[in-house]
Image (spheres, rainbow, N blue to C red):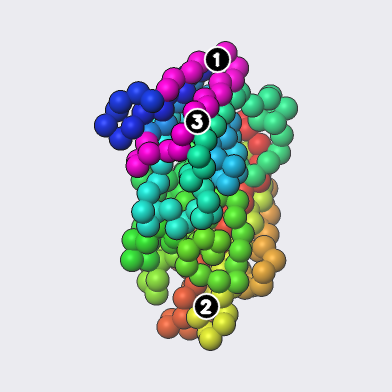
Amino acid sequence: MNIKLTDRLGMLRKEVSGNTEALLTLNSPFGFEDEIHIKTTPKSFVTIELDKYIKPATIYTISGNIKYVIPVNWKLKAYHPDAFTQEDIAIKVSIPSNNFINSRRNLAFNSLDKRWDTGYFPHASANVVTRDEPWFEAKNAIDGVINQDGHGVYPYHSWGGGLREDLEFTLEFGRTVVIDEIRLYLRADFKDNHDIHWESGVLEFSDGHEMSVKMTGTKEADCITFEPRKVTWIKLHHLKREISAAFSALTQIEVFGNEV
C-alpha cells in the first residue's frame, strides 16, 4: 500500500509505502486543501488513522484508490475544533484483521465520509441538506459522534433537511452485507421548541423490501430489528412529524450486521 501527500496543486509533499501498513509523518502541518492519496488492493478494506481528533475508520474501496482532501474554512465546523491543526502530520494506513472484518459490527460507521461520491464506503447521502451547511450534511450521521441535545456545528452536527416533507437519507455499503439491526439516534434539541422528533418513517432495502418504523424521540436509540437481509444500500424516507413548523434531524445511524 502507498500513501501520498500532495498540496492542492498536486505537488508532492511526501510519499511512503508498505506491505500491510504504512505510516506517513511530517514535521509540518497540513496546508490549505492538502490531498491525501491512498493506494491499496481493489475491492478491499483499509483502516485509516488521519488525525487524533478524528476516529479511525475502516472503509471499503472498490478501485483501491482513495482521495481525501483536507476540509477548510466553514467545512471544518463539522469537525472537532482542533482537527487538522496539529503541527506534525501522522497518517497511518493498515489492513484490518480478518477477525475484525468478519465480526458483527456497525457497518455504517465512516468518520472519513464526504458529502459527494467518494468511491469508498460506507457513504451517506441525502436529497436535501439544510442551507447546504456542512454541519447538516448526511455524512455527519455516520461519523460516530453522538451529541443530541443541540444543533449546528460540532459536536451537535447532524443530518438535517429543514422543514421539508420529502426528505430521504441513503446509506450505501459498496458491496453486499447482511444486516439485522438499525439504531437511530434522533436529534433532541428541545429547548425553546426548536426540535420535534420524527414519529414515523419508512426503511427501504436494496432487495426491494420496505418496513414502517416508529420513533420515540428520546435520547436512547430507536432500535429496529428484523430478520437478516442481504443488501447493498438502505434508505430512510417518508419521515413524519407532528408539528410541521419544528425541526427534526438525525444525529446518528448505526447498522449492525456482517460481511457476506
Query: On the rendered image, what quadrant is the C terminus found in?
Result: top right
On screen, residue 232 versus residue 229, left or right, reads left
Q: Position of residue 103 (x, y in %)?
A: 71, 34
On screen, residue 32 versus residue 210, left or right, reads left
Mark 1 Cα within 10 Å, few/some/many (few <14, many 20+)? Answer: few
Whichever of labels 1 and 2 marks the residue nearer the N terminus, that label is: 1
Q: Is residue 39 visible?
A: no
Whichever of labels 3 and 1 marks the residue nearer the N terminus, that label is: 1
The circle on residue 18 is: 1
The circle on residue 195 is: 2
The three-letter amino acid code for the residue at tag 2 is: Asp
> Considering the numbered disc 1 on the image, is that residue within a helix, a strand or a loop?
loop
**In the image, what residue occupies the spot 52% across and 25% down?**
24
> Considering the numbered disc 2 on the image, is that residue within a helix, a strand or a loop?
loop
Marks 3 and 1 sit apart, C-alpha to C-alpha, by 20 Å
- State the residue position of label 3: 27
User: Is residue 23 part of the magenta span, yes or no?
Assistant: yes
**In the image, what residue occupies the spot 50% across and 15% down?**
17
Mark 2 Cα within 10 Å, few/some/many (few <14, many 20+)? Answer: many
